[in-house]
Image (cartoon, rainbow, N blue to C red):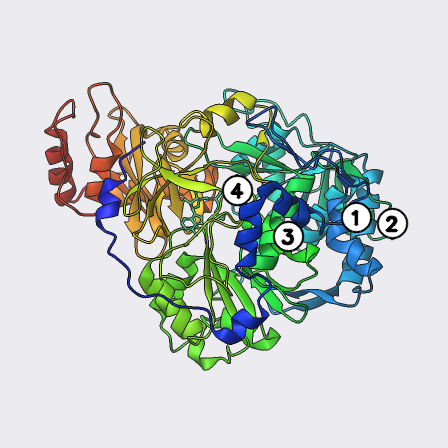
Amino acid sequence: MVNVAHTLENLHHESRSFRPHAAFAAHANATSYEYKKAGVDRLQYWREAALRLAWRQPFTEILDWSDAPVARWFHDGTLNACDNAVDRHVREGRGDRVAFHFVGEPGDTETLTYSDIHERVQKAANGLVALGLGKGDRVAIYLPQIPEAVVAMLACARIGAIHSVVFGGFSAESLRQRIDDAEAKLVITADGGNRRGAHLALKPLVDEALASHGEGTAHPEPCASVEHVLVVRRTGQETAWTEGRDVWWHDAVDPQPAEHEPEWVEAEHPLFILYTSGTTGTPKGLFHTTGGYLTGAAHTHRIVFDLKPDDVYWCTADVGWITGHSYIVYGPMINGATQVLYEGTPNTPHEGRWWEIVEQFKVTILYTAPTAIRTFMKWGEAIPQQFDLSSLRLLGSVGEPINPEAWMWYRRVIGGDRCPIVDTWWQTETGAIMISPLPGVTATKPGSAMTAMPGVCVDVVDDAGRPVPNGEGGYLVITEPWPSMLRGIWGNRHRYVSTYWNHFDGMYFAGDGAKKDVDGDLWLLGRVDDVMNVSGHRLTTTEIEHSLVAHPWVAEAAVVGASDEVTGQAVVAFVIVRGDAHGVPEDGDEVAAALREHVRHQIGSLAKPRTILVVSEVPKTRSGKIMRRLLRDVAEDRPTGDVTTLADPSVMDAIRTGLEAGTGD
Ligand code: WT7
């Protein structure tokens, strides 16, 4: 862990505070009574939240913590996630409500009601059963942001299969790792998707992932667990076909009967696995179970986003991330929300695309990431101002700390100074929002996520695990179990315990630094480990380093997350080229370009370094540990900090001189 003190110094006292407008507060779903209720009896509070779900068999026990740190919530109840997200609305007369206004990047749109989804999801469930899938089987989903992605997830949940969604920006190699780790029996994919006006191929990457990668590679054998690949036709691209393995969605799903009885599962039945970067090289397969996760997602969605029946809610995340799981698929659908689902990028075909969508569908609630807001700031406020954004009434932020400038811009330019902003802190691990203002209750400060959600116990502690007083910073911890907490790392209880529970006795360690201000409000300060946050996506320095050294030109690599005006952090790599390597270009820029492409191919485009600097050495301690702090100084163009613990203090001078001489990118 690194010291968070340097970040703390940069934090000024914030005197601005925005109280909810009286008109908003008067109709808000949540009042200060939430905090009171949760404070009086936390478990009872969660019991009531859980009772809003539709249970097949009611639960009697709220929390069983006897196997800590693996929790069991509501464990003797049974339910089905898809029944809660879809069937229930049809059953209770809300079938005609629009579930999704889908907007494809090329401009195609489709409106889907809850009844439409009900029909599709039953056909898909029957299709999965016909392919031999059942309760407990794992299904990898590698799809663009199209309605079938939502239907596929819910169909898995419907039959009790466990989905593992892999973001479409990951490489074949990353997909293979995830398929193997979960031993998935089925992959659901598409021929391709639309990205920046072009067709992005997906099926060829699945073919590559499942094939043998050749002798001496990490995957000498073809993938053993996958029996079928179910392919949605989206772009109409030509695709290679493996007879007997590959099946078209329109052949396997569309002709199926639209009746399927959900599989009623125990509350602790795993709902999904989602891989996320850890501090070591291999991604962790975090898994969530049904009853507690759904309780957390639906409850927080209702009280943080203040959802009402006539709202049009748009969460801009991809369903491949936890934000899409909790705040597109499960939370909002359980609450019967009408949503926008958009396939593409914010600047295709023009930089006003999002605002055009807000205007067209009269979006009332927008949930997005600081990196997007900063991008729009860069493009200029004249662009959103060309559109009618007056339908908006609530704005949300997630993924990384939001800087006060971006917060203020979001409030003024997008929210017309009338919309409350909820800055929501949470993680793949937490399943649902843990820290956030309540929009009708909390007076907000630009840049602060403010306070723990009702029923959630967080603290900021020092190295010894002691709570810090107001005005001081330390490590963010969660001190009591919560319903939507991860239940573990797939197949690796030991790693679960050591990653999250061994730092501070009996407390969940989130990996983030935080500060309590003088009023006790919380400010998130970013990761304190080797995890980077690039555009709200989690990446590990070591994962990218491993990828770089796997290239024949590279002798050694050190990766840091350098601060970046738009993406929050950016990947900067320092590489030492092998003296004996053949065919290495003279020009450092060419080396950098080839290595960036290599990382994209190995991990995915999101991990591509912004900058690669060719250097002659990297700074290390006497015990051989790379001193990333010093490399960050170089990457961020600051004077070099304390070098006394370096094995060879002259290394930093050599790096600086080398870079000035122009060997870098
Ligand atoms: C990490 C979790 C859960 C949403 C998407 C990211 C950072 C997330 C905030 C916020 C400051 C934030 C933290 C956290 N983070 N939201 N509002 N303020 N930091 O999920 O990939 O699991 O990453 O994102 O560092 O640990 P994730």
Residue found at x 56% / y 25%: 219
- Which numbered circle lies on residue 298? 3
- Which numbered circle lies on residue 256? 2
Please name the residue that numbered disc 4 is placed on.
428
326 sits left or right of 558 in the view: right
Question: Could you say which is closer to the camera, residue 66 or residue 83?
Answer: 66
Residue 577 location (% of width, % of height): 26, 31
Label 1, label 2: how far apart the Cα atoms are: 8 Å
Residue 503 location (% of width, % of height): 40, 27
Q: Does the residue at mark 1 contact the one at mark 2 (Cβ under 8 Å)?
A: yes
Note whether residue 74 is visible: yes
Note whether residue 665 is visible: no
Please name the residue that numbered disc 1 is placed on.
124
216 sits left or right of 257 in the view: left
The picture quadrant where one finds residue 203 is: top right
Q: Is residue 567 positioned above or below 280 on the image?
A: below
Residue 540 location (% of width, % of height): 40, 36
Name the residue type under label 1: Ala
Sequence-earlier tag: 4 or 1: 1
Residue found at x 35% / y 63%: 406
Please tell me whether mark 3 or mark 1 is closer to you in this view. 3
Sequence-earlier tag: 4 or 3: 3
Label 4, label 1: how far apart the Cα atoms are: 27 Å
Identify the element where label 3 is drawn. helix
Residue found at x 55% / y 50%: 323
Disc 1 C-beta below 8 A from ligand 1: no
Please tell me whether mark 4 or mark 3 is closer to you in this view. 3
Identify the element where label 4 is drawn. loop
Please tell me whether mark 3 or mark 2 is closer to you in this view. 3
Sequence-earlier tag: 1 or 2: 1
